[in-house]
Image: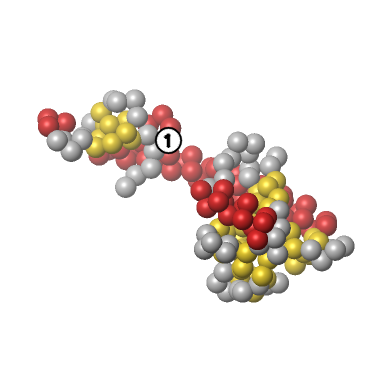
Amino acid sequence: MWMASAETVVKGVAAFGPEAGKAFKATGEAIESTYDAYKAGEKAGASIAKNAAKGKAFESQVAKELEKTDESIASQVTLKTRSGNKTRMDFLSLDKKTGKINVTEAKSSKTAPLTRNQAQAHPEIGTSGATVAGKGKPGFPGGTQIPPTQVNIVRP
């Protein structure tokens, strides 16, 4: 299945009638061929890759800032909340002065939304904490208990 940009988002594929099997853009305009569908996906793929690169670059900036105040910085750590929700945090770290665990999520724009799992897990991490899932990362092995901690969302 292809992905498409906002201007070429596929609305759906007709299942019945004379339009059966045709794909349609969100505007209602028919996508006439598989090549048109491929090109729509190609545009979206380039946009997705560009946003991913921007996100990684911003994460690197955030990591450098964390190094000033924190230690044992681990990136891309999956946490599991008491309710079973799993979410991958951009960073777990320890405050150099207090030893307190910090949980940080980097969003590379002012409007980048939280994922559904993040929106559900962040408040729960703040009230009841979480557990590092899987093998974990150096400094935060699997099973590490994260106490109730406010998730720091960093934006430019």
16 left or right of 11? Answer: left
Which residue corresponds to mark 1? 5
Residue 9's image quarter?
Answer: top left
Q: Tell me if mark 1 has few (under 14), some (14-19) or many (20+) residues whose alpha carbon lies within 10 angstroms of its own.
A: some
Residue 83 percent location from the top left of the image: 54, 61
Q: Nearer the viewer, residue 85 or 72?
A: 85
Q: Is residue 6 left or right of residue 142?
A: left
Residue, far right? 97
The percent position of residue 38, horizontal first and vertical second, equals: 32, 40
Residue at x 28% of width, y 32% of height: 24
Q: Is residue 41 visible?
A: yes
Q: Position of residue 117 (x, y in %)?
A: 52, 52
- Which residue is painted at 35% across and 29% down in the image? 26
Could you say which is closer to the camera, residue 32 or residue 26?
26
Query: Horizontal and vertical percent for residue 7?
Result: 41, 29
Quarter of the image that includes the C terminus = top right
Which picture quadrant has residue 19?
A: top left
- Horizontal side of 70 relative to 58 (left or right) equals right
Name which residue lies at 79% across and 63% down.
100
Left or right placement of residue 69 versus residue 118 in this view? right
**Residue in front for this viewpoint, 122 or 14:** 122
Q: Nearer the viewer, residue 15 or 4?
A: 15
- Residue depicted at 77% across the width and 55% down the height: 66
Residue found at the far left of this picture: 18
Amino acid carrying label 1: it is Ser
